[in-house]
Image (spheres, rainbow, N blue to C red):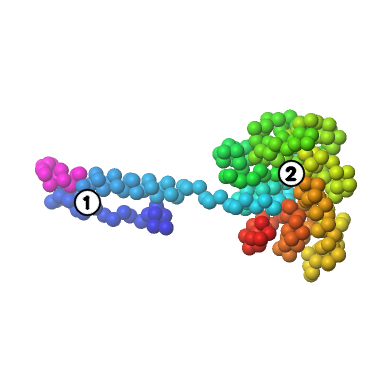
């Protein structure tokens, strides 16, 4: 853009040379007269105009980038392993992110493996704080006028001890978190769902919670309250043989459609992990109605949904 070129060193057009003596750009001010006064006024006006234009260009240069289209069906698997945890997923429009946590010395630390935890990578600093800050900037939404965003917390340490610590932390973010009651859900900017080692009995006994449970396909048999288990996730390889190469077998396509339909009739969303990360798999999952596409390739999923507009 033209203003970028100006800011990179190109000069503004030179002012007309005024006065009758001296070197280039000099003016004779020893004898003020009408001509000199006129010149000074002209110069002042030009300087003011230049400042105004430069200020406008700077403001344009600092304008916030356009917001991505929220992708309701995009889930950032092991989001914390990206260079910019959370922010990369949000920049690509993802409405669901995953964070593994360990309870270490009273802190909820984010990492895939216990030996890789770091005291500066807490659940609060990587996820809860920036999510709340963004919700406050966007009138209570993560994306302006957008849907709630799911924070899927995969508990790697002891279920009961970790949930006891997590519950206290979540209470500090009550202003932006979804509330789950016995048979009701009060949606807010951020919806927390617990996976991995889940304190199932404790959560089920609470009349009001700031977290729900990520169930398994076997939980469809019990038909627990949706406010307790709003999401069903499972390991793809335990139920299907197709690895994303070649045609999707007809019998497996029918099986997938039946599982998704059963979950949806109970009011639950569906996600699979351990799926191949490629457009052919994403397309089959969405055609079957799978609600969250589990992905590591953030840019690839965003491009997929942009191209497959009917599957958004």
Which secondary structure class fits the magenta region best?
helix
- 265 sits left or right of 311 in the view: right
Where residue 210 sits: x, y (%)?
A: 73, 34
Q: Which residue is mark 1?
A: 25
Residue 33 within the segment the image draws in magenta? yes
Where residue 85 sits: x, y (%)?
A: 66, 46
Residue 277, visible in the rendered structure: no
Residue shown at 29%/44% (left/top)? 48
Residue 155's place in the image compared with 276, above or below, is above
Residue 236's place in the image compared with 165, above or below, is below
- 255 sits left or right of 132 in the view: right
Label 1 CA crowd tier, 10 Å (few <14, some 14–19, many 20+): few
The magenta-colored residue range is 29-41
Residue shown at 79%/34% (left/top)? 182
Q: Which residue is mark 2?
A: 152
Quadrant location, the N terminus: bottom left
Residue shown at 83%/62% (left/top)? 254
Q: CA distance from mark 2 to mark 1?
A: 66 Å
Where residue 108 sits: x, y (%)?
A: 74, 36
């Amino acid at each position: 853009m033209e203003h970028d070129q100006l800011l990179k060193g190109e000069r503004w057009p030179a002012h007309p040379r005024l006065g009758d003596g001296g070197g280039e750009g000099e003016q004779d001010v020893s004898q003020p007269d009408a001509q000199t006064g006129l010149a000074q006024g002209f110069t002042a006006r030009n300087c003011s105009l230049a400042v105004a234009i430069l200020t406008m260009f700077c403001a344009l240069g600092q304008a916030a980038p356009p917001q991505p289209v929220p992708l309701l069906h995009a889930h950032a698997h092991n989001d914390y392993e990206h260079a910019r945890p959370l922010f990369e997923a949000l920049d690509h429009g993802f409405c669901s992110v995953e964070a593994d946590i360990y309870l270490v010395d009273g802190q909820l630390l984010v990492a895939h493996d216990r030996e890789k935890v770091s005291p500066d990578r807490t659940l609060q600093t990587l996820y809860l704080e920036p999510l709340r800050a963004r919700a406050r900037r966007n009138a209570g939404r993560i994306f302006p006028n957008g849907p709630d965003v799911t924070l899927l917390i995969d508990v790697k340490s002891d279920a009961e001890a970790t949930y006891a610590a997590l519950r206290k932390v979540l209470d500090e973010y009550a202003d932006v978190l979804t509330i789950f009651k016995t048979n009701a859900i009060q949606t807010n900017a951020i919806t927390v769902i617990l996976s991995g080692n889940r304190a199932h009995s404790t959560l089920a006994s609470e009349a009001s919670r700031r977290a729900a449970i990520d169930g398994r396909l076997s939980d469809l048999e019990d038909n627990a309250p949706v406010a307790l288990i709003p999401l069903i996730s499972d390991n793809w390889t335990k139920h299907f043989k197709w690895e994303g190469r070649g045609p999707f077998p007809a019998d497996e396509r029918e099986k997938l459609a039946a599982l998704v339909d059963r979950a949806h009739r109970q009011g639950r969303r569906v996600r699979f992990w351990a799926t191949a990360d490629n457009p052919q798999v994403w397309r089959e999952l969405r055609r079957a109605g799978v609600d969250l596409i589990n992905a590591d390739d953030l840019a690839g999923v965003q491009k997929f949904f942009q191209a497959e507009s009917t599957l958004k």
